[in-house]
Image (spheres, coloured by chain):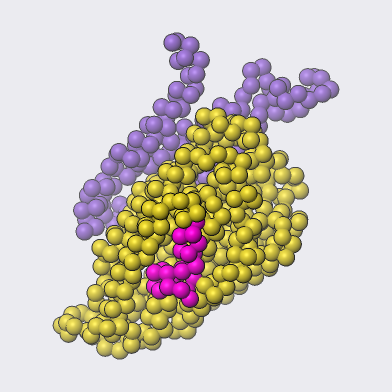
Amino acid sequence: MQTSAPVVVVAILFFAALLLPVVRRFSAAAVYPIALAAGAAAAAVSLWQASLVIRTGGPLVSWLGGWEPPWGIEFRVDHLGAIMSPLVTVVSLIVLVFARRNLGERLERRSHFFYSLYLLFTMGLVGFVQTGDLFNLYVFLEVIALTGYALVAAGEPRAPFAAFRYMILGTLAASFYLLGLAYLYGLTGSLNFVDVAARLAEHQDTRTAFVALAFLLVGFGIKAALFPLHAWLPDTYSYSPSVTVAFMAAVGTKIGAYGIFRVLYTVYEIGTHRQHLPVTEVMGILAAVAIVVGSILAIAQTDLNRMLAYSSVSQIGYVLLGFSLVNSAGITGGVLHVLNHAFMKSSLFMVTGAIVSRLGHGDLRRFGELGRQMPVAMATFTVAALSMVGLPPTAGFFSKWYLVVGAIQAGKWPYVVVILASSLLNAVYFFRVLESAYFTRRLDPTSAYEHVAAIRPLPLSVTAPLGVTAIAILLLGLGSWPLVEHVVRFIVPAGL
Amino acid sequence: MLAAVFGWYNYWVLSLLMLVGVYGMMAKRNLLKKLMGMNILQVGVILFWLTFSPKLGATIPVVDPSLGETIRAADYANPLPQALMLTAIVVSVATTGVALALLIRIHRRFGTLEEDEILQRMR
């Protein structure tokens, strides 16, 4: 069905981003409301178009400039887009509300630039998950990357260095993607997902197709922080502003996972039109190693931010493990985990931001009595932590359930062991935080933080987003069956 | 042997460029040299795309009536890689701009662009 809605979402965010620095010249007070309105409008339109996809059952397409697909650029929102696009805009909106009181004094003075970059970042993400053109994908990838570097660099004094390292690896990733795409274009002469997939059929087993696939996957693997390509992630997450990391951790690495899904299942049609390639086996092994190593490194951390960063390395492993199984349950689990993890991680990082803003540190050994001091924040943290561990009513249980089923169906018992063992490891590092916050007294009265006798209560603009994410985690868990039945089922390629 | 070198010289050159670029990004300890490596890699990839464009005996992709009534693709260079790489060049310029801005801030804070020294001072 043809509609201009996908373009509208991108356009709203783009023009609002351009408008903010101009608005600032006339009224500083108007900057935030306009950013919020743009975020809300984008979320509304993308939710509406998702409902349209579910009702009509087919992809929404819009042809930019009226050029038909193989020639022109196409925006194409299929069922995967119908999940990803609202996910991006809704999480963006939630974190935008959180940003109101959490930018910090230094950023607050230049908040118009920060919000402008934030909206551009969101625009890049939305465009990335909506486009149906491989080169357009590259352009949005770079929009995400460039705005992302700037958003990271806005953090503490060490942040620019972390951002620069991220940039070196990020550009390497983008260059690999572009290189792989060059092979693919040379082979098929086309750039549209669907068209390339159709033309690739006759070049099925050529070496060029394999080389292209390898470059594309390594490129997206770096973006997804797949072990051992994750080196950029921990520093980037620990030094960037809490607002940036709450959003970036939720959807940033998912971009790589989305790209890998598109390459494997939309363009190369692995498992349906093509034989299993060794590439999925390799990816599965790397993902399994990522799950274990990420969890172990997370246990070794004492800083909450860093712990969550390593936990992200582990969690992206679940998603890619699901995609590497090449069966229905595995893909379902992977897609659900993209969704669940986005809400869990943004929630956890927002809580961390709130804690750091009040305590002045993120050392999880010194959280004594925090459960009583910040009840809403710690309650949200508990819900998200239980979901990360994978306890039944929460969302995390259901994605892991599908992953385990997928691994069993694929006959890969080591992966079943990895998923279950990693739940235990998750429990170790999350319960450590909960124990510190709920069951320990403030031990050392001489320490600097003792003078924070009564912590100022969190404002509504912080507690509301936290509450929303906590509820979302529970709803995604309880509603996972209808979600699979009406949306995710159609993402799995027919025949798997 | 010579044919393999000269017949494919563009591929040799741009493979070399990409390798030099990746080497610079990964092995050099100076941040500015890393950035230079990044640019060299990008140029290599861009040149690789551009090798798809020209055809032997073809002209620029503007329809020329003197070539006959029917338009044959073989008569014209492929304009698409050039158009795409124009975008990629813009992206690479923007990336360089952001990178230089970051380097200025890093230098102001740490007084050096040597990675080892910065890591030491971050402790």
Q: Is residue B2 magenta?
A: no
Q: Residue visible at 64% across and 35% down?
A: A201
Q: Residue visible at 56% across and 27% down?
A: B51
Q: Colour of chain B?
A: purple
Give the image location of residue A430, x and y in percent.
33, 71
Q: Quadrant of residue A379?
A: bottom left
Q: Residue visible at 46% across and 55% down?
A: A407
Q: Is residue A143 left or right of residue B119?
A: right
Q: Quadrant of residue A476?
A: bottom right
Is A290 drawn above or below residue B52 in the view shown?
Answer: below
For the record, the magenta segment spans A385-406
Q: Is residue B69 left or right of residue A237?
A: right
**Residue B103 appears anywhere in the view:** no
Q: Residue visible at 64% across and 39% down?
A: A196
Please, which residue is most extreme toward the right here? Answer: B69
**Residue A286 appears anywhere in the view:** yes
Give the image location of residue A100, x and y in percent.
48, 76
Give the main secondary structure, helix, strand or loop, of the magenta stretch: helix
Is A124 drawn above or below residue B41 in the view shown?
Answer: below
Q: Is residue B78 left or right of residue A366?
A: right
Give the image location of residue B80, x and y in percent.
64, 34
Q: Colour of chain A?
A: yellow
